[in-house]
Image (tube, rainbow, N blue to C red):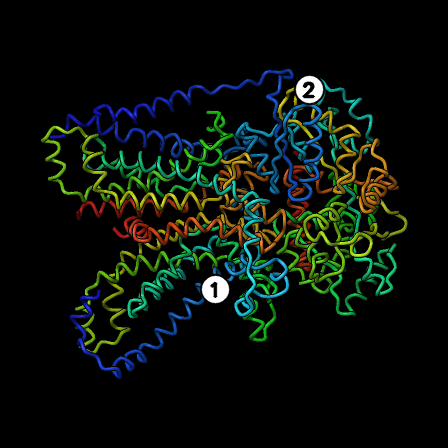
Amino acid sequence: MFRRQAWQGFLFILPAVVLLTVLVVWPMIRTIYFSFGETNSRLQSTRWVGFDNYERLFTKDKEFLNLEVFPPEGALINNLKWVVLYTSISLALGLLIAVLAVRVRYESLVKAIIFVPMAISATAVAIIWKFVYDPDPDVGSLNAVISLLGGDPITWYGRADVVNYALIFAYIWASTGFAMVVISAALKGISEEVLEAARTDGASEWDIFRRIQLPLLSLPLSVVTVWLLINVIKVFDIIYVMTGGGPGGSSEVIAFSMYDETFTNAEGGYGATMAVVMLLLIIPIMAFNVRRFRSERVVG
Amino acid sequence: MKRRWFIPVAVLSALALALGGCGGDDGGGTEEGDGTITVFSLWGGSEQEAFQKVLDKFTADTGIKTKYESARDFLPVIRTRLAADNPPDVAIIPRPGVVAELARDESLIPLEDMGLDPDTINENYSDTWTSLATVDDKLYGVVAKANSKSTIWYKPTSFEQNSFQIPTTWDQLLDITQQYDSKGEKPWAVGAQGRDNSWTLTDWFENIYARKAGSDNYTKLFNGDLAFNDQTVKDSLREMLKIVNDKYVAGGIDTALSIGFVDGIGRVFSKNPVAEMYMEGGFVGGIALGDVNPDLKVGTDIDFFPWPTIDEANGNPLVGGGDVASAFVNNEDNKKLIEFLSTPEAGKIWVSTGAIASPNKGVTEADYPNELVAKEAEQLKTAESFLFDGSDLLPGTLGQDFGTLLQNIIKNPGQMDSLLDDYQSQAESAFAK
Amino acid sequence: MATAEAVVRPRARTTSARIVGFLQKSPVHIALLAISVIWLVPTVGLAVTSFRPRGDIQSSSWWSALTNWSFTLHNYNLVLENAKMGSSFVNSLIITIPSTLLPLALGSLAAYAFSWIAFPFRDTIFLIIVALMVVPIQMALVPLLILFRDLGVADWYVGIWLAHTAFGLPLGIFLLRNFFITLPRDLIEAARVDGASNMRIFLKVVLPLSVPALASFGIFQFLWVWNDLLMALIFVQNSDLWPMTIRINQMQSTYGIEWHLLSAGAFLLMIVPLLVFFALQRYFVQGLLAGSVK
């Protein structure tokens, strides 16, 4: 019955579609094109090199991927560490806090404390944690605790072997609130009677969590996981501010290398290749989102 | 009311118009300026204030306004601005390697094209300096300031208390280092974090290499005629590791790699210092007095001595750097500024702030306000031989990566050989381009 | 929640029962306390530091200031004036406000069409937009820079406004459309029967009923843009126009790690998000939930 209005529908979406086409889709195509070429220092493409950039990225660039040492090193491996640790720990902590907090009266206070870091920028998070990690035990809280326990201060962001974990934890601190809030909202949806009934039947709290709450949380958990994954594949700001990729390039991730190659080294083609790799990593998530949406539509 | 939905259409057509209306006016010739010059450089803090005095004088003389912009991450900012065709009018470029690259991409304007006579501009400078701004026989700018990088900063009172003499040989310097250490003091601070500060390590290496392997090898190495995994390089690195190690650097290598170069200065010259000596160029004095700790007294709290010789046969060459002022836009205003920066007058105003030494022949000893900069200027003038900061001359990304290489070597001295091999293969392809 | 408890639990609990209950839960309390402390300490430490004189920061720890009070606003004065954080604060607002309003306006227009106007390929186009939600900005940085060059807008804010708008739109359309379709169909049909145009229905019926959704997305986008560093690094080129995120970085490299400056700068950067968060927490959390849990 709305058929005569079809052209109005197009008009309504036109501004958005035009902007998305010109500012998102077309640049994507350009970047994919760039990734097969080289640029000059003004980032204008100058030469077609085929798959050379991709070959260099995965076989020759030891800062990106170094398989000659064990365990392997490089920006890609660092990003992998980020993906695994950041996603799993944020999720686990968010779940833990949500499940615990629901049992106490000061729930909203605890949740506010955990959630506040979500609102602030990665730049501020980096400064806050640089202060926590300061090597001087009279400045850095973490080294103060270590000294108190009789240990030697650790230069958290100066050591190649710990810098990535220091950065990852700072970012977990900032993101756990998100996981917690989403999970907590889902927990509230589970009726209290069901839980009480289980308790009366003698089920332990652990059983209740595993057999009743957890299965009902599978959708929100997957949602949070997707969000965390997207976030972590793109991670850049916190590293740029806290370590500048150092020491010696050991905290670089894909997004950082992309920025560095493109804008410091004027290797626009090579940087584009890294951007494409990021996109390839994200595409499965994209597909998941689209599928989820379609299945929801069928249900609704 | 009914027409409200035309808004999206209006937005769209505006965008279409804008998209169609892209034009450039890259015509030749020197155009009229708009009365304001944006000048871009990497100095902030006290260094920026000092340079501002030069710009103020220029404005007073010519009526042309200037707008100073700065960013420590100089290269990314210049590149994004060039890519967007929004370059600053004039930039003061810290690395001649970058000058050459930008000149060859035709991003910089040759002075001749601006109607400036290279010979007149060069009158006040020795060939050492003019060569830095010359690319393929064309002059692209003036060397606005010069730095000795062969300076080691120390605390005279502390030397006095310990009865240390100013070291003239490497062994004497190592001896002082050990003595400080045996007294429980940390002899050195190093600040070499990330990409923006790794150049402090390249300066360490260059000073040692010039003295240990000699000027000829130095020139060959940084011109691509000698391999980076050559034995001479390894020998010099071993000398460097005698000081730049966990034992002698305050906080160890981990700390050195987690603090910037200004923080490194602070670890020696702030109100609660943790180390005794700092190796970096002449500009350390200005930053220490201007930003880190204004209460310092020159000659008792802070001073420098020239790098000691390592191998007498190689003498004591001076490693130094210079910043080149170049124009990205060809107009009358910019022409006047470049011309002004090449005059002794501009040099005198600038050195009077105590922030820099000037390579300009017209600037004399009497123009320097304190003995630190006067000494630096003297060192520059009387050097038996002058070597330009080698890593700044390396092509493409090699200069940046050389800093990263040294970060990795001081962190893992055991992997020196393989790290150098990797870097050499990278250097070969970069020099081949 | 409160009602559920009232139903299940006996209303009158003796004091001893309460104590027993509390003790049974004590591992829970201890765990939550520990977590809360870990989460609070970093921010509190920096907050305390931002009010301490420079000399004190260098000579004693921030926790010693908790027992030995000596605070000042001088650091804030310093960063506002010398380090140009004041003008950067204004710049951040100039960048953020249009970058929030534009996707709100264009996104809600599109979301209305996707919810209440039937047109060919509607679902396909919508699915493509859902897919665009996760495209990393890195895929567009250089081409956008070149586009802004061709448009001649690289030396001002237009570029960053457009970039943030485009990259905020997919989420905006998605969130708002999900809300719009929950509005009662009868209401919209009734307006149509009365002869109202789509624009009129959108402005007079849908928008007024959707304030919570608009607020949620608006706040989300506002914070996103305010907190952004990467896009500003590329698209805000003139240093007079820099937002606070870039300015703080410059401060760090110019003056070194001077905690009296960095801490005050970081808190100025955090003030607006914290105010928004505490004043509009409900909308913010709803926005997050709407974007994630269906």
Residue A147 placement: quadrant: bottom right
**Residue ID at (34%, 60%):** A180
Q: How far apart are labels 2 and 1 at the CA level?
A: 59 Å
Q: Is residue B97 visible?
A: no
Mark 1 neighbour class, 10 Å CA radius: few under 14, some 14 to 19, many 20 or more:
some
The quarter of the picture where the C terminus of chain B appears is: top right
Which residue sits at x=17%, y=75%?
A: C11
**Tag 1 subunit:** C
SS of the residue at dot 2? helix
Disc 1 residue type (three-letter): Val
Residue at figure coordinates x 56%, y 63% from the top left: C70
Choose top left, top right, bottom left or bottom right for residue C197: top left
Q: Mark 2 highlights which residue?
A: B114
Q: Which x, y percent locates residue A127?
A: 53, 54
Q: Which mark is residue C41?
A: 1
Mark 2 vs 1: CB contact within 8 A: no
Res. B223 image quadrant: top right
Q: Is residue B176 above or below residue B24?
A: below
